[in-house]
Amino acid sequence: AHSCAQRHALGGTLGDADDSLARAISAARAGELALEDAAVEAELRTRRAEGLAKELQRSLRDEVAACSAARAETECVHKTNRQLERALDERLAADHPAPARQRSAGGSAGGGGGAA
């Protein structure tokens, strides 16, 4: 009877151990699945971040190209404006000689001639 009770107690202990092992295996599987899910989610986030980074790089390249084109256009406009200003100054100088130059050049010769 004593050994029968021991066997019964041992069987209960082994049954408890089996249940604990089954729970541990189940928890380990759940943990593995959670890890796999987390890895997949991390991979998706990484790909999204890489896609956003590439999109930002393209956008920045486009912006730099647009700024370069605008700067070149602005420089061209400034150059054209300077050329037009010079041409206008030359035209005005040819059409209307500066009175100060005329007087100073003619004034000393004319003043000397008028005083004599």
Image (cartoon, helix red, strand yellow):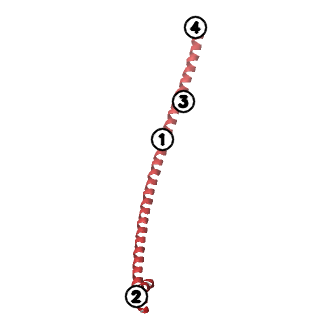
Q: Residues within 10 Å of mark 2 (few under 14, many from 20)?
A: few
Reading the chain from its start, which is encountered first: label 2 or label 3?
Answer: 3
Cβ–Cβ under 8 Å for marks 2 and 3:
no
Q: How many marks do you count on the picture?
A: 4
Disc 1 marks which residue?
A: 40
Q: Secondary structure at mark 1?
A: helix
Disc 2 marks which residue?
A: 109
**Position of the C terminus by quadrant:** bottom left
- Residue 57 % position (x, y): 44, 54
Reading the chain from its start, which is encountered first: label 2 or label 1?
Answer: 1
- In this view, the mark in front (4 or 3): 3
Disc 4 marks which residue?
A: 3
Q: Residues within 10 Å of mark 3 (few under 14, many from 20)?
A: few
Q: Secondary structure at mark 3?
A: helix
**Position of the N terminus by quadrant:** top right
The disc labelled 2 sits on which kind of residue? Answer: Ala
The disc labelled 4 sits on which kind of residue? Answer: Ser
Q: Give the vertical position of 106 relative to 6 (above or below).
A: below
Q: Residues under labels 4 and 1: Cα distance?
A: 54 Å
Q: Residues under labels 3 and 1: Cα distance?
A: 20 Å
